[in-house]
Image (spheres, helix red, strand yellow):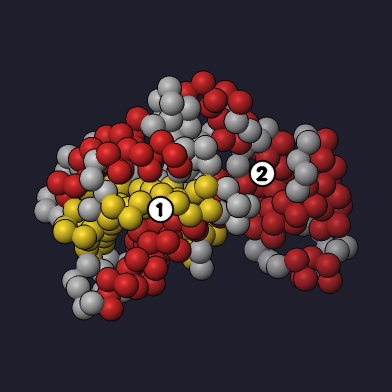
């Protein structure tokens, strides 16, 4: 049986050998999870011998990370905005870049609520539900609808609704197919990676994250074209459509929205200064 200190060293060495640049951090997180304690406890009890079952669990997780299996899938959770969401291989891992989408939608909802409007929000291609659920946590009075083509993704969505104690309607179907009525705001982070680019993505993404949530077709715009074409039929007058986009897609998506009759079409940058969100009003 190994000590805490020995396991931290083993984890760091193995992760570094696999090319993991965050080895020092990730070995700590994984051992915290395996032992059910925090890092301060590990520092104070470095010579403590670890139970065999916990040691084996930790070393198995280290093996998985050395094979590029995502840390968030191992832990079964990902942090997004101010919340922690359950995730597994059936949904994309929430990313910091997507927080710009939520922040933009939050600003629009603030303005709508100032007019005392009863607001209905549709999160299309919802995946884990992190976008729509975050919006509902910040704006408790909105009526939230979460929709996805993947039934397995919706199982994750429903678990997150329960974990974060949020009420929402969930729909299964192809984009707007199951949606009835109209929304004041439609928010979406659809698949937008060009098909030929997927093979060049980091192994954590291309080998483990759901392909149907990544592949946006030859030009990456397949879902934008469909959503933009149909959205006006499902938006209330003066309603908003808000997208996350790939950093090189702003011009094309803005053009598609303008051509379809959206006004006040704008782009927002992420914290790295890259185009990340496009939105407009019908």
Q: Nearer the viewer, residue 44 or 91?
A: 91
Tag on residue 31?
Answer: none
Residue 19 rendering spot, x and y as whole percentages: 78, 36
Work out which residue is located at the far left of the displayed protein and give it: 181
Q: In the rendered image of this protein, does residue 176 appear above or below residue 120? A: above
Q: Which of 138 and 106 is in front in this view?
A: 106
Residue drawn at x 39%, y 72% is 138
Q: In the rendered image of this protein, does residue 23 appear above or below residue 213? A: below
Q: In the rendered image of this protein, does residue 153 appear above or below residue 195? A: below
Residue 61 rendering spot, x and y as whole percentages: 66, 44
- For the residue carrying disc 1, how many other residues have a C-alpha within 10 Å: few (<14), some (14-19), or many (20+)? few
Q: Can residue 191 be seen in this view?
A: no
Residue 149 rendering spot, x and y as whole percentages: 29, 38
Element class at badge 2: helix
Horizontal arrangement in the rendering, residue 193 relative to residue 47 (left or right): left
Image mark count: 2
Lower sequence index among marks 2 and 1: 2
Residue drawn at x 35%, y 58% is 132
- Mark pair 2, 1: CA separation: 43 Å
Residue 217 rendering spot, x and y as whole percentages: 40, 25
Quickly name the residue at label 2: 61
Quickly name the residue at label 1: 266
Element class at badge 1: strand
Residue drawn at x 43%, y 22% is 218
Residue drawn at x 70%, y 48% is 58
Q: Which of 236 and 54 is in front in this view?
A: 236
- For the residue carrying disc 2, how many other residues have a C-alpha within 10 Å: few (<14), some (14-19), or many (20+)? many
Does the residue at mark 2 contact the one at mark 1 (Cβ under 8 Å)? no
Which is closer to the viewer, label 2 or label 1?
1
Q: Can residue 102 be seen in this view?
A: yes
């Amino acid at each position: 049986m190994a000590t805490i200190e020995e396991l931290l060293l083993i984890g760091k060495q193995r992760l570094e050998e696999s090319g993991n640049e965050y080895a020092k951090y990730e070995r700590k997180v994984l051992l915290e999870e395996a032992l059910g304690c925090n890092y301060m406890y590990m520092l104070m009890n470095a010579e403590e011998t670890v139970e065999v079952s916990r040691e084996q669990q930790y070393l198995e997780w280290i093996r998985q990370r050395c094979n590029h299996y995502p840390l968030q899938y191992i832990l079964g959770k990902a942090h997004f905005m101010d919340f922690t969401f359950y995730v597994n291989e059936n949904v994309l891992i929430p990313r910091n870049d997507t927080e710009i989408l939520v922040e933009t939608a939050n600003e629009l909802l603030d303005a709508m609520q100032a007019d005392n409007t009863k607001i209905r929000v549709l999160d299309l291609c919802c995946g884990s539900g992190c976008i729509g659920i975050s919006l509902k946590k910040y704006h408790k009075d909105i009526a939230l609808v979460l929709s996805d083509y993947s039934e397995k993704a919706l199982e994750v969505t429903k678990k997150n609704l329960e974990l974060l104690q949020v009420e929402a309607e969930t729909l299964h179907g192809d984009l707007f197919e199951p949606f009835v009525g109209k929304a004041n705001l439609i928010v979406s982070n659809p698949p937008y990676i060009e098909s030929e680019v997927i093979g060049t993505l980091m192994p954590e993404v291309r080998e483990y994250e759901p392909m149907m949530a990544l592949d946006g077709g030859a030009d990456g715009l397949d879902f934008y074209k469909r959503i933009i074409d149909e959205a006006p039929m499902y938006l209330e007058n003066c309603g908003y459509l808000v997208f996350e986009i790939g950093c090189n897609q702003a011009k094309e998506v803005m053009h598609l929205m303008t051509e379809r009759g959206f006004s006040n079409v704008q782009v927002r940058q992420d914290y790295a200064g890259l185009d990340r969100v496009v939105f407009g009003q019908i």
